[in-house]
Image: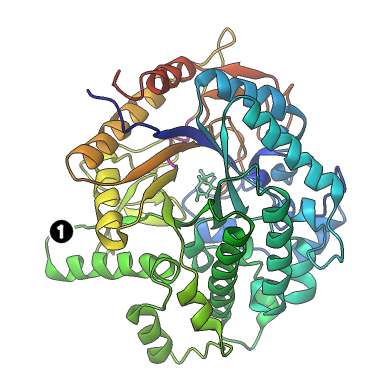
Amino acid sequence: MKKFPKGFLWGGAVAANQYEGGWNEGGKGVSVSDCARHHLDVDVQDYAKQNEISTEEILKAMKSDDTSLYPKRHGSDGYHHYKEDIKLFAEMGFKVFRLSIAWSRIFPNGDDKEPNEEGLKFYDDVFDECHKYGIEPLVTMSHYEPPINLVLNYDGWYDREVIDMFIKYVDVITDRYKDKVKYWLTFNEVDSMIRHPYTTGGLVRDRFEGKNFTEVIFQAMHHQFVASALATKIAHEKNPDCKVGCMLTKLTYYPYTCKPEDVLQAQQDMRSTYCYSDTQVFGEYPAYLLTKFKNEGLNIKMEEHDLEIMKKYPVDFVSFSYYSSSCVAKDDAGLKKTAANTNIAIKNPYIPSSDWGWQIDPIGLRVSLVDLYDRYRKPLFIVENGLGAKDELVNGTVDDQYRIDYFDAHFREMYNAIYEDGVDLMGYTSWGCIDLVSESTKQMSKRYGFIYVDADDLGNGTYKRYKKKSFDWYKHVIETNGSCL
Ligand code: BG6
């Protein structure tokens, strides 16, 4: 195989809420994720249940110091281990490290007058540590980390005031880190608010009684679209050379059969996730969303300059997560279903599944790359992909050949997309390059990393790091820029 393009950004990704821990240290405020309890008692297929939370549960969580019930409070304890971790990433040869800034470390309540210097200093140190090894940080501004105060006292992103608070936070971080961060992402999986309104939008259903909750969600999304455009503007003003991307969940839908009804269903489902990144790339609402608002009588309040702002500040590149494809049918009654990333899909008889039922489809990654590139004609960045598996630590390592096989197959399809299909792919960051707490099930045992973290689902363990077999394998891929595949 020939090499991947010169300068290809190989690396790995984490998010503060799943990796850092240190939930009440360094002046950090409580975030939405700190109040999300584990779901060890909930069926993995029951995605809706995993994401439901009530005001009462939040208030209960806020009174509790428990870290075992609320696993994101301990994460991988990256807050205390980041130097050791970045050193390991450097050993693998990472060119880029994707992480998020926890908003509640910088503005503990979201509406504070002044930022928390200790939080700002923490990320200074993290970015310095990356640069020490020539690793470029790729930073998500918001990855399920709104301060809980914004949920309880402002109704999350439904409240227009939250745009101003977010912009103040963006102004502070893009100014402080203008010489340290070249790549920014505004909102992680911007389309996901529809599937998990609480973690993405800070929306709790019982706070909107009497209101149409779909309208609430789309109002909150509108606020995020405006905020994303303003954040792009500000980041460019602080550093004209920086690049800002959007981030979408690439839920690649296949029709379960060639019945025209199923094909139409797949197309409609696909449009229903593209429409959010469309607003950030094209700077305007797609016909799909405007028609939906009209047909469903959703009254989305927009201020005079909102559409102008969205049009003026589109993103520079398109990033996305891809784990699996999903089969859909017009009538799926009686068909076997399985869990996927934030959704439930019909089981595809032609491909295998992970330990958590997510279907493994490397060709689907190529399909996704081609679709996105043809649609947007902007550079693409795969910022999440990987295999959540049950790893077993034996004699200080994990023989995760299954993970190597997963990556190998996906990298080959990236190669094909670049060299056969002409896709402009900037880089690749595997999800959870070091084990962390899962978003959907809040389990530590759903492991994605090249590095094993000794902690269990309840947070017990030494948090010692161990290299898995895939560690050296990925190191070799990066060393040879993919030509060893
Ligand atoms: C993406 C999220 O949806 O999928 C991550 O951006 C998440 O935060 C990842 O961790 C994998 O999902 P899970 O549920 O296996 O952690």
**Quadrant of the frame with the C terminus:** top left
Frontmost residue, 451 versus 420: 420
Frontmost residue, 175 versus 364: 175
Magenta segment, prevailing SS (helix, strand or loop): loop
Q: Which residue is drawn at 64% across and 57% down?
A: 238
Say whether residue 2 is left or right of residue 174: left
Q: Is residue 305 above or below residue 154?
A: below
Q: Residue at x 33, y 24 (%)?
A: 482
Q: What residue type is labelled 1?
A: Thr
- Residue 23 in view, yes or no: no
Query: x, y percentage for residue 158?
Result: 64, 77
Frontmost residue, 443 versus 171: 171
Q: Mark 1 points at which residue?
A: 257
**Quadrant of the frame with the N terminus:** top left
Say whether residue 258 is left or right of residue 266: left
Q: Residue at x 73, y 46 (%)?
A: 70
Q: In which quarter of the image is residue 187?
A: bottom right
Frontmost residue, 372 versus 311: 311
Query: x, y percentage for residue 349?
Result: 22, 44
Secondary element at tag 1: loop
Q: In this view, does 370 lie above or below 268?
A: above
Q: Residue at x 55, y 11 (%)?
A: 394
Query: x, y percentage for residue 321?
Result: 43, 48
Say whether residue 303 is left or right of residue 57: left
Range shown magenta: 384-389
Q: Is residue 346 one of those drawn in magenta?
A: no
Query: x, y percentage for residue 164?
Result: 71, 73
- Residue 436 in view, yes or no: yes
Q: Is residue 403 above or below residue 147?
A: above
